[in-house]
Amino acid sequence: MTTSAFRPVAAWRDMACGTFFCGFALVGLVSVVNSPALMNSLGQG
């Protein structure tokens, strides 16, 4: 088999990994925004 047969599978895997990490980052962002202690400390440098 050639490597071109595996390209669609690799593309779907890359998309799934990207979606997973974006979701993980979104959970972290929501956690920071909903925590007053973390939001207050952001601008204090």
Image (cartoon, rainbow, N blue to C red):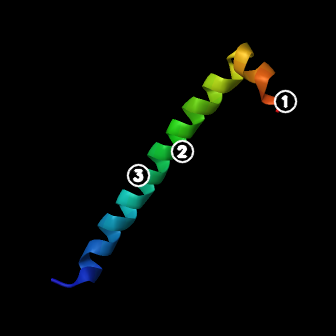
Q: CA distance from mark 3 to mark 1?
A: 34 Å
Q: Tag 3's secondary structure?
A: helix
The residue that mark 1 highlights is 43
Residue 7, percent across and down? 33, 74
Left or right: residue 35 versus residue 3 is right
Residue 30, percent across and down? 63, 26
Residue 11, percent across and down? 39, 66
Left or right: residue 27 versus residue 9 is right
Q: Tag 2's secondary structure?
A: helix
Left or right: residue 1 versus residue 39 is left
Q: Nearer the viewer, residue 37 or 31?
A: 37
Sequence-wise, the earlier of marks 1 and 2 is 2
The residue that mark 3 highlights is 16
Nearer the observer: mark 1 or 2; the answer is 1
Residue count near mark 2 (Cα–Cα under 10 Å), binned few <14, some 14–19, many ≥20: few
The residue that mark 2 highlights is 22
What amino acid is at disc 3? Ala
Q: Eyeballing the image, is 34 above or below 17?
A: above
What amino acid is at disc 2? Cys
Which residue in the rendered view is the most extreme toward the front?
A: 45
Which residue in the rendered view is the most extreme toward the top?
A: 36
Q: CA distance from mark 3 to mark 2?
A: 10 Å
Image quadrant where residue 10 sits: bottom left
Q: Which residue is pictured at 82% across the width and 33% down the height?
A: 45
Return the mark for residue 8: none
What amino acid is at disc 1? Gly
Sequence-wise, the earlier of marks 3 and 2 is 3
Residue count near mark 1 (Cα–Cα under 10 Å), binned few <14, some 14–19, many ≥20: few
Q: Which residue is pictured at 25% across the width and 77% down the height?
A: 5
Q: Tag 1's secondary structure?
A: loop
Nearer the observer: mark 3 or 1; the answer is 1
Count of marks, rendered view = 3
